[in-house]
Image (spheres, rainbow, N blue to C red):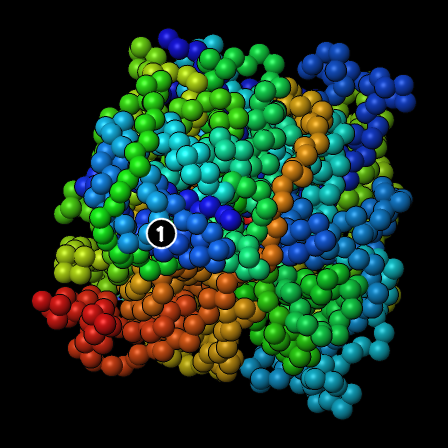
Amino acid sequence: MSEFHIVVCGSIVPDPLQTLAPVEAPTGWSLKNEMMLPAVLDPWAGHALYEAANLAKKHPGSRVWLVSLAPKAKLQQVMMAVSQKAPFELVVADGSASGFTDSHETARVLAETIKGIAGLETSKMLLFGGWQSASRGSGAVMQMVGEMLGVSEQFQGVDKLTVHDDGAIEVKERIEGGSYQNSLVDGAPAVFGWATGELPEPPNNPQIGMQNMQKNMPALMQAKPADLSGTTMKLASVAVPQQRRETRVVKDAPVDEMAREIVEWLKS
Amino acid sequence: MSKVLYLAHTECDGTLHKSALETLTAAKALAEGLGGELAVGIIGADVAAAADSVAGCGAKIYGVSGPDFADARYASDLAAAEAVATACGAEIVVAPATSRFSRALPGLAVRLGGRVDTHLSGLAVADGQPVARRWFYRQRMEGTLTRSERPWVLTLDSGIAEPFAGAGSAEVEALTVDVSGVRTKVAGLECPSEDQQTIRPDARVLLVAGAGWTKKQADGAVHVDVAEETILNFLNATKSSLGSSKSLVDISGEGNAVISFLTHMHQVGQTGASPRHAKGLSTCCHGEEPHVVGWRFISERRAINTDAGCGWAQGKCDVLYVGDAFEIMKKVNEMLG
Amino acid sequence: MSDTTDTPEVPRAEMEADIVCVGFGPAAGGFLTTLTRGLMNEDGTPVAESAVVPGMPPQVICYERADDIGFGVSGVVTKGRALRASFPDLDLSQIPMAHEVTDEKVLYLRDPVGASRRPAVFKLADKALGRWMEDDAFELPYVPPFLQKHPGMVFSIGQLNQWVGGNLMGTGMAQIWPGSPVAEPLMDGRAVTGVRMADQGVEKNGTPGPGYMPGMDMKAALTVVADGPVGPVGQHLDRALGLPEGKHQREWAVGMKCVVDLPEGCDWQAGTVLHTIGYPEPEIFGFLYVYPGNVASLGIFVPSWFGNPVRTAYRYMQHWMQHPYLWKRLQGGTMRSGGAKSLQESGRRGAPFLCGDGFARIGEGSGSTNVLTGSGVDEAWATGVMLGESVLELMKEGKPYTRETLEATYVARRRASWVEEEAKVAEKSRDGFVSSVVKGFIGMGLTGLTNGLINMPGSPIKPQDRIPTIEEYYKGYIAEGEVLEIRAECARKGTSLHDALMDRVGWPQIPLDGTLLVSHQDALLMGGKVQAAPGYGDHVRFADPYTCEACRERVCIEACSGQAIYTNPEGGAPLFDREKCVHCGACMWNCSKSDLKDSERTNVCFRAGSGGLHSVEN
Ligand SMILES: Cc1cc2nc3c(=O)[nH]c(=O)nc-3n(C[C@H](O)[C@H](O)[C@H](O)COP(=O)(O)OP(=O)(O)OC[C@H]3O[C@@H](n4cnc5c(N)ncnc54)[C@H](O)[C@@H]3O)c2cc1C
Ligand SMILES: Cc1cc2nc3c(=O)[nH]c(=O)nc-3n(C[C@H](O)[C@H](O)[C@H](O)COP(=O)(O)OP(=O)(O)OC[C@H]3O[C@@H](n4cnc5c(N)ncnc54)[C@H](O)[C@@H]3O)c2cc1C
Ligand code: SF4
Ligand code: SF4
């Protein structure tokens, strides 16, 4: 049976239920009231974490780290919820989780942080993450982290991962038009950018929460500030599109007439 | 003089996808705008036909081909892209944001010591500099950005330019790339069959079905069978793509009468997809905000609802037909023949 | 029921802490802030050793049901006496959406549409005060002292809770777990030995389903019940222990509110505080507080003594917002988020047993909220501080947490506090409303101005006994036959009855603009929306479905703040949609029938649930 060292990259994003608006400050763009908005674990990264925990459970001796680049005060709040869902060791780089940072800088900080994990064996490493963040949505960070760590067996949009008895890993990736591509990689190390996966969100388990926080609180306290300044990327403008239209309401018209209008429109 | 490399991969039939041709138009315009030179790189099992189809662009064409490059695979695609970019000394790489390149090309930025920006919704030149446009926060806001790092790898979403047309006879400089060390094997694809296929990203029209189709109608009864038939007839007649509201796909979890061919993959909206189609017709869907945000890339929108006060009436569509979708769609199907 | 053979037997987990606290509102904030500051000696050694993890300081756990510790709903304007005492150097600029009170007004609003049900005195006032009115509003020449919040501050309770919680977790001395609904106290006779968390992986009706995980038992030497006005742990204790002689909780209100980005050029300055009376109905009070950055928190209170059985606070709030005085300054604004929550208005009169063996109660659920002054935050905080001081005292002396020791410390502190003194004054202030609004207002004024010496007599009636039939309420306005027709029409179309009836008696339609005047559903989806975590059972259930079946008022449906309770098209008890519920608790007292087994309660069971509103602004 294989033993894996699973490193999950996942940060926090504003609770998707919030209304978001961009604002510009001398330091660059950010979200209005960014530090005030409630945050959650980035959804696809969350699926990656639950898949990782599940895989580790099936492969005794495996370990799971959650590597997060995020402002630690906010991360601490989010961890109170996430910690209850699956056991993991938290590794924190204290810095911005904004969608407006350069994906390369985010990847560089993550790669450097992962290199600093004591006890991590690259030959057993499965690098997990969300295939896109809900903030930047670049779908580029995981590939770059993998490259920086020298891992070039990579998969994106993963919905399923099966480990065969010989250690080979079968992967199902999302591609266009509701289709899937199946691949087989002979084993670790490899990178997996997860889509939804197959597992439901685990319940909140207060016991797991308390075990996690005992080891993870120190990691939060000791988090080092991350330097994301190595970029020339400049956002000239960010705007929320105006979507309001002039709606013509067709009422009390015969069915035939409405149908005819629709067909004409479809054909035009 | 800046060198713009346009990268594409072939489809299974050896052609280039529409989105690849659109990207070529954008890449060509970029090279011209920058006063630079355009080069083309094509990756695939056999790239000759694809190269011919774009020969009219006048650029030098590089090819990486062979069975190793037939399938989408990170390590081999990246190695091929790296070989082309190195061979032509690319400063800017422009490629379509297909699933294949979205997987492989971010790694290219690291290999070349450059940077990457993905899923662009626009690409232009201003003050002699490329200006990229892309969405942030799940398509909730759009920004424009510039940067001075090079090489700069850019992937473009579909729909940002007209597809390039200009076939001819191409001369391809073939590059050999050794991928014998790659540990991944592609086993195959799982595609829904043409008939079952209801998500059609390339369709002109999106039909959205809402929970109203499974609700009690004026006669006090539920008519899911009629609903299914009406929807399928429309899809068959128009080859439209099918989308759904969250409520309708969620209902299936509660043991209610359901539309059998709908899954969560069909869900449009904040927690679903934001598909791109020229036209969208919403039926039996209330038009609530979390749903309608998924219509961002639907240009023309019409809706049918029995409720004149539904969300669509509030500036969310161009035309709202207040009426019974069962009746109206039946008639529409008849007229479509 | 029990043919669940395919459900594996899942053992219930059990853990131990020294102190477990239920709910994280201002009361728990005051308690934990006080406690954690005193847990360590100057030399870095703990003041007492944990009984469950030897060698460590006492283990303190707090469970909050909402998905984030900032998802509360409240005003808030407060004098902040207890808060200031806890944070003498409080710098309001460090807390988002906080400001000093700069201007305070009480406004009498005239009915500009002619649909309000006004007793003669109000009609008279509408006329008599007319010439001093601006935009149909009369500004009281002075703010009665009992209402004054000056000097004081305005807050967003979500931001305040986040700030307090962030500080607390930073100390490492307490853990606050969000997304953790506590189902009930663990009881041993009249003693409490800890709490039981809500089950997960269950069906709507609570039976085990796939992924069943029975709620864990968390044992603790002291259970602190701080679960607010409608908290199920407090409610459970009230049922199990009864209320002290002469106490009852029959006075309620639901606060329906929203946070609004004010239009540009609005002349309300940060720190402005408005209280309104008189409109949309005389029974409904309004509030509006202005935050820095041109943002306001505003809303209304609909009390249990409002006689209309078809009521949704949401529509009344929309009419109130459109009152000319307010609308002049609100028009062009944008709703950021909405919310609703119950207030326990019985105050001291509803105070339960404040402690017992192994437990103590703080905050609104312990009767701390002052109806006369309309404040509960600082009062709740103060009760938490008092318990925190008492627990530290007992810890240092090595004493157990028994009824006697807690009486001698915590209850003694409460009896001697300003919270208690002011609560006594407030206790009788609202009785007048029982018989009529006019008497109520006079009563409230008398009580306030005479410091409780003179009160309007009247004794509180259970909300369910007060609610008239729809036909009774509309007598003289709509003929019985027509009410029947409207009912039938609404039932057939599945539309709201209260809307139809309000339209019928002359309330204008709401001109929805999609930004500030939005549909009730859209309001639940704006800004901080509503969401329910999967895997929990329904937390709103109907005690006896047959009682519902026979019920004609169906107040629960009309009053639901989230449109989460709705008519079952098949007949029978109403249906409940957990996805829409904002956990306001209003259904608990907005029901016209008593629970067959307990006449003090209604037919709605309001239990522990997760999820609800996702907004840290309210
Ligand atoms: C956090 C969050 C995220 C969400 N994300 C999404 C999302 O991604 N996508 C999404 O869709 N929703 C999402 N929702 C849910 C969304 O708010 C709505 O509940 C949902 O879109 C409603 O679906 P519906 O309009 O199909 O159903 P309903 O609201 O039930 O509306 C049915 C409609 O059908 C009409 N109707 C009935 N019979 C007929 C007939 N014969 N002819 C014509 N009309 C008829 C009715 O008038 C009604 O308007 C989300 C909600 C939340 C809280
Ligand atoms: C609209 C409105 C406006 C108000 N305006 C003002 C004002 O201007 N000034 C003022 O001073 N007061 C105001 N109040 C009153 C004030 O908000 C309350 O009195 C105060 O919040 C009470 O504090 P608390 O800590 O006792 O309870 P709460 O604030 O209610 O906190 C209790 C907490 O317990 C949690 N909880 C409940 N059940 C469980 C469970 N089973 N498991 C775990 N956790 C649980 C709840 O989610 C909640 O977070 C207003 C109230 C409302 C509704
Ligand atoms: S819960 Fe109460 S108000 Fe609602 S239907 Fe039942 S008895 Fe009537
Ligand atoms: S069902 Fe939920 S939203 Fe409705 S009144 Fe009850 S607690 Fe409030």
Q: Residue at x 80, y 52 (%)?
A: C93
- Expressed as whole percent of the image width and height from the top left, the position of residue C238 reads 62, 40
- Residue C192 seen in the figure: no
Q: Residue at x 55, y 19 (%)?
A: C14
- Expressed as whole percent of the image width and height from the top left, the position of residue C449 reads 85, 67
Instruction: State which quarter of the image contains the C terminus of chain B.
Output: bottom left
**Residue nearest the observer in this picture, C388 or B297:** B297
- Expressed as whole percent of the image width and height from the top left, the position of residue A64 reads 51, 20
**Residue nearest the observer in this picture, B124 or A123:** B124
Q: Secondary structure at mark 1?
A: helix
Look at label 1 and name its amino acid. Answer: Leu
Tell whether B303 sits left or right of C601: left
Tell whether C109 sits left or right of C12: right
Q: Chain of mark 1?
A: B
Q: Is mark 1 within 8 Å of ligand 1?
A: no
- Residue B41 seen in the figure: yes
Q: Residue at x 44, y 47 (%)?
A: B4
**Residue nearest the observer in this picture, C605 or B27:** B27
- Expressed as whole percent of the image width and height from the top left, the position of residue C131 reads 76, 91
Q: Which residue is mark 1?
A: B24
* Residue neighbourhood size for the residue with mark 1, other residues' Cα within 10 Å, grouped as few (<14), some (14–19), many (≥20): many
Q: Residue at x 39, y 75 (%)?
A: A247
Instruction: Name above or below for residue C567 compared with residue A127.
Output: below
